[in-house]
Image (cartoon, rainbow, N blue to C red):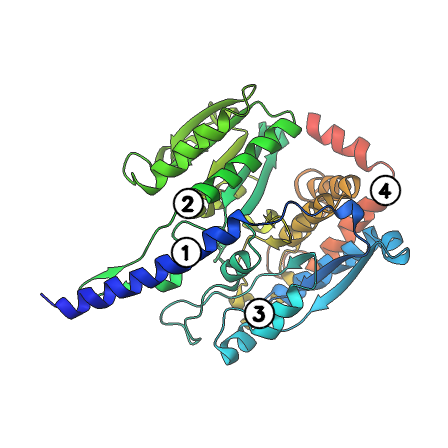
Amino acid sequence: MDKAAIDRAKEHFGKLLEDQMKRMERVKAMPDWIDYSKIKPIKIGIIAGDGIGPFIAKESRRVLEFLLKDEVKNGKVVIHDIEGLTIENRAACNKAIPNDVLAEIKKFHVSLKGPTTTPRKGDPWPNIESCNVALRKELDLFANVRPVRVPKQGIDWIFFRENTEDLYALGPYGIEVDADIAIDFRLISAPGSDRICRLGFEHAKKNGRTKVTCITKANVIKTTDGRFLENFYRIAKEYPGIQVDDWYIDIMTAKLIDEKRRRDFQVMVLPNLYGDILTDEAAEFQGGVGTAGSANIGKQYAMFEAIHGSAPRMVKEGRAQYADPCSMIRAEAMLLSHIGFVEKGKNLEMALDICGQYEKKMTITGRSDGATGAAFTDYIMEWLKNPKLKETWEVYLKA
Ligand code: IPM
Ligand code: MG
């Protein structure tokens, strides 16, 4: 037995625990939620990302500027680009987020982010941490909120995925113990579970939802999932009017495709990795990950992003102009609601629903047989200007 390898691993583990205990202190000392109604100007940063990112970011920015025309004019909102979060720059700095870029991001209250490449072992890039994951940790964006709606099928789900813990917290800090054994660490904390569960219940309460479901694998992953579930039921007691249940992640992936059961789910709360997987599956009902938006919310900052990757192959094959901007534009709708422009956010969602699921005057295929991202964005903006927007959307709901 390689005693030295064990000692090295123990020391490494001890260091990780020290860092995480310090993080717990920071989480517990976090100031309360920022109040956007009192802030002027609200600073919105646009992070283009890489791959197809700059292409879809350009379209998203057009929509944002159109919807916030008056607010920009009267100084309530400013919109700026944040440069430098590209795989080339991150690789050159050998950092998930270069220091100057992080400092810049922190100058904005909220950001809208295009996809960024996440290298993995064997890629031509250094194996740096995903910058999504790093940003979520740096800005303490503990909630990843992902709605999926297919009104025609009665699907109206919203996922509250914990966003800073689980296998992601220590994802880059596993141990290659020796030639045979590799270990990663999974971390779930009580404050971390409490705040995501509470946000799920608060959402249910404020939006007239009657049920919240927790998803774990607590029968097998007893310590960490056990703690998440225990905290879920403890927080549930504060919301006596709301029904609760819990499911294991494996059967949950099946129940989402069970036509008889899937309408029963409303608000779902779950740890990070299960949330990553289940929300991709869920988005498929709505037309795929290209159509889903995602909000990364913390008490001080928030970041809104497309839930898909940077599709470098589309760029290499010269097809980037055919990339679908809808996921990023849907994220933008969430951004608008989050900073207080609920009506504008709703209108944008309606326009997206009409263009993508109802009228479908054009479709995006990612290739030259479909619409370009720019043409589709024009189509969305036409609907935003159309006085029959709401009326038409209501017809679609009943269709
Ligand atoms: C997502 C993505 C990211 C994640 C990747 C890009 C690191 O899949 O936002 O769901 O796993 O969280
Ligand atoms: Mg994912």
Q: Mark 2 vs mark 1: which is more N-terminal?
A: 1
Q: Work out whether mark 2 precedes mark 3 in sequence or the reverse, and give the earlier one.
A: 2
Q: Is residue 290 left or right of residue 347?
A: left
Q: Residue furthest bottom?
A: 92
Q: Residues within 10 Å of mark 3 (few under 14, many from 20)?
A: some
2 and 1 marks in contact (CB < 8 Å): yes
Eye-nearest disc, 2 or 4: 2
Which residue does the image show at 90% across and 55% down from the upper left?
A: 74
Left or right: residue 8 compared with residue 195: left
Q: Which mark is residue 189?
A: 2
Pick the front one: 36 or 264: 36
- Observer-side mark, 4 or 1, equals 1
Image disc number at residue 20: 1
Does label 3 point to a residue whose CB lies under 8 Å from ligand 1?
A: no
Instruction: Identify the element where label 1 is drawn.
Output: helix
Q: Please name the amino acid that badge 4 sits on.
A: Asn
User: Spatial distance from mark 4 to mark 1, Cα to Cα?
Assistant: 51 Å
Q: CA distance from mark 2 to mark 1?
A: 10 Å
Residue for badge 4: 386
> Of marks 1 and 3, which one's residue comes earlier in the chain?
1
Q: Residue at x 66, y 61 (%)?
A: 56
Q: In the image, residue 399 lies at what x, y percent?
A: 69, 27
Which kind of residue does numbered mark 3 sit on?
A: Val
Q: Which residue is mark 3?
A: 315
